[in-house]
Image (tube, coloured by chain):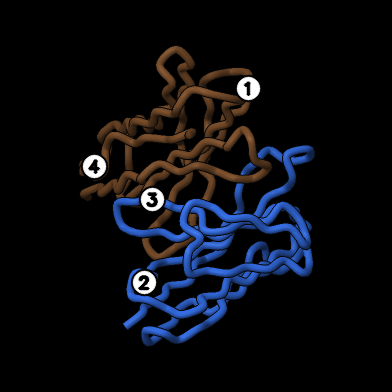
Amino acid sequence: AQSVSQHNHHVILSEAASLELGCNYSYGGTVNLFWYVQYPGQHLQLLLKYFSGDPLVKGIKGFEAEFIKSKFSFNLRKPSVQWSDTAEYFCARRNSSNTGKLIFGQGTTLQVKP
Amino acid sequence: NAGVTQTPKFQVLKTGQSMTLQCAQDMNHEYMSWYRQDPGMGLRLIHYSVGAGITDQGEVPNGYNVSRSTTEDFPLRLLSAAPSQTSVYFCASSYSREIGTGELFFGEGSRLTVL
């Protein structure tokens, strides 16, 4: 079965620190990858997505992710985090055999200290 | 354009009671789904639908029922609530594979507590 794995469950950073959240996906099928963010008490919002082309994807709020096919990875990065980035982050891949199904990782809680 | 609308936002039930979580979208999306979110477990798919009249089970379908009589609506029914169903429920929708990129649009969530 296809799967997504996020290595860090809870990350604590100070403001202005750099961020990298790990995401690995299982082999198989067409790879469409997403990062979603969930701010406290809110619904999930799309940060960025990769479908094809340039493996370095830029998203909203200064986030970017790099698709590395050889490592089955799609890590999320931000050079300098802000307190407002405190949220839960989910990596997801599209299920290649189903129209709209996304497979989510377990999520990473990011806490940014002011 | 309201997007994906879920009601109610909060609900407390007693064990054995039944209820329906409502979900409606106004984007003419073919695909609709229900996820539950539990700490440390990410989002798990309960049921999904690829179009009106078509539904199927996801990872954790037991104890839940769905129907899709229209493109817009996709209600989730809890038949006999159990404490294990205490969770936050999200409805999501997207365009079909043929015309969309697979991005899911989420509702604001429904927090359910079963006592």
State left or right for residue A20 relative to residue B69: left
The three-letter code of the residue at mark 1 reads: Ser
Q: Which shade is chain B?
A: blue
Q: Report the chain holding disc 3.
A: B
- Report the residue marked by disc 4: A11
Amino acid type assigned to the residue bearing label 3 in the image: Gly
Q: Which residue is mark 3?
A: B42
Q: CA distance from mark 3 to mark 1?
A: 26 Å
Mark 2 vs mark 4, CA separation in Å:
26 Å
For marks 3 and 1, give the one nearer the viewer: 3
The residue tagged 2 is B86
The amino acid pointed to by label 4 is Val
What element does badge 4 sit on? strand
Q: Where on the picture, by quarter, is residue A63?
A: top left
Q: Chain of mark 4?
A: A
The residue to which callout 1 is attached is A52
Q: Measuring 41% from the left and 75% from the top, which residue is drawn there?
A: B112
Mark 3 Cα-neighbour bin, 10 Å: few <14, some 14–19, many ≥20 = many
**Separation of residues labelled 1 and 2 (CA atoms):** 39 Å
Number of other residues with Cα within 10 Å of mark 1, as a class: few under 14, some 14 to 19, many 20 or more: few
Residue B105 pos. (x, y %): 61, 53
Q: Nearer the viewer, mark 2 or mark 4?
A: 2
Task: Say whether marks 3 and 2 touch (CB < 8 Å).
Answer: no
